[in-house]
């Protein structure tokens, strides 16, 4: 009889222990599920922030590289250089004097307005991205006549300690022209109207 009473007393404690273990397992599952969701959500949010930063830098860089005022050349060419890195920056620096002469001779003012843009490729680990930006370029000649042209630009960006910067820039193909190549051709904008 004493054994039955002792077994009866143990039974509720085993049930309690099993219930406690089940509760702990549920709590652990909720915690790990919540942690997984938070990490996955944070990774997506971080990627979205990077994509937005790339798009903003790409649009601003393309706008800067297609804007140049003959009356404030130094500032405009400084913006070109601040928007670029790598081979594109080297080419801009090497050609700066030539650009100055061309724009001063033509007396033009070129402004660009971003119409739309999209990130077409983003490799965060490699620090590379590509964008396509539609812009409207307005050129005012020395005689005050102006012309406007819409254009699509392909830009490649590289991550630098100072943020994302253009490392290549070129025109996007239009119409029935073949699609964009894997690497937009390196190039620099030439002062419009010159």
Image (cartoon, rainbow, N blue to C red):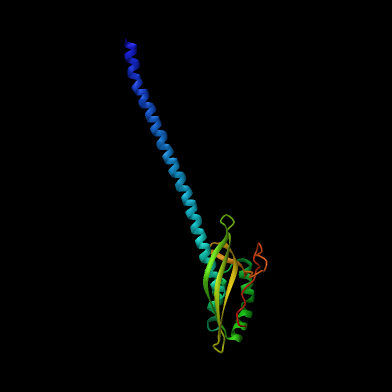
Total numbered labels: 0
Task: From the viewer's perspective, tell me whether residue 96 is left or right of residue 56.
Answer: right
Q: Does residue 34 appear left or right of residue 157 in this picture?
A: left
Asked if residue 49 lies left or right of residue 120, the reply is left
Q: Quadrant of the C terminus?
A: bottom right
The quarter of the picture where residue 139 lies is: bottom right
- Residue found at x 53% / y 66%: 57
| Residue 137: image location, x then y, percent | 55, 77
Residue 148 in which image quadrant: bottom right
Residue 191 rendering spot, x and y as whole percentages = 60, 79
Counting from the top left corner in percent of width and height, residue 41 is at: 46, 50
Q: Where, by quadrant of the figure, is residue 87 drawn? A: bottom right
Q: Position of residue 36 (x, y in %)?
A: 47, 44
Against 108, is 113 above or below? above
Most distant residue in the front direction:
176
- Whether residue 162 appears in this view of the structure is no
Residue shown at 59% from the left, 71% from the top: 152
In the image, taking residue 177 as reference, residue 163 lies left or right, namely left
């Amino acid at each position: 009889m004493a054994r039955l009473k002792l077994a009866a007393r143990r039974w509720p404690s085993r049930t309690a222990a099993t219930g406690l273990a089940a509760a702990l397992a549920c709590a652990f599952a909720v915690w790990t599920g919540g942690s997984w969701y938070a990490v996955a959500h944070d990774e997506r949010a971080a990627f979205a922030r990077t994509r937005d930063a790339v798009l903003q830098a790409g649009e601003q860089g393309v706008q800067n590289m297609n804007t140049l005022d003959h009356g404030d050349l130094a500032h405009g060419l400084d913006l070109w250089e601040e928007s670029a890195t790598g081979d594109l920056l080297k080419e801009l620096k090497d050609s700066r004097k030539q650009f100055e002469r061309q724009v001063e001779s033509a007396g033009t003012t070129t402004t660009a307005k971003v119409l739309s843009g999209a990130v077409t490729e983003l490799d965060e680990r490699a620090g590379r991205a590509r964008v396509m930006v539609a812009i409207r370029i307005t050129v005012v000649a020395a005689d005050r006549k102006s012309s406007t042209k819409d254009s699509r630009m392909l830009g490649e960006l590289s991550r630098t300690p100072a943020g994302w910067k253009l490392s290549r820039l070129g025109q996007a193909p239009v119409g029935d022209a073949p699609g964009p190549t894997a690497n937009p051709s390196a190039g620099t904008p030439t002062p419009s109207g010159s």
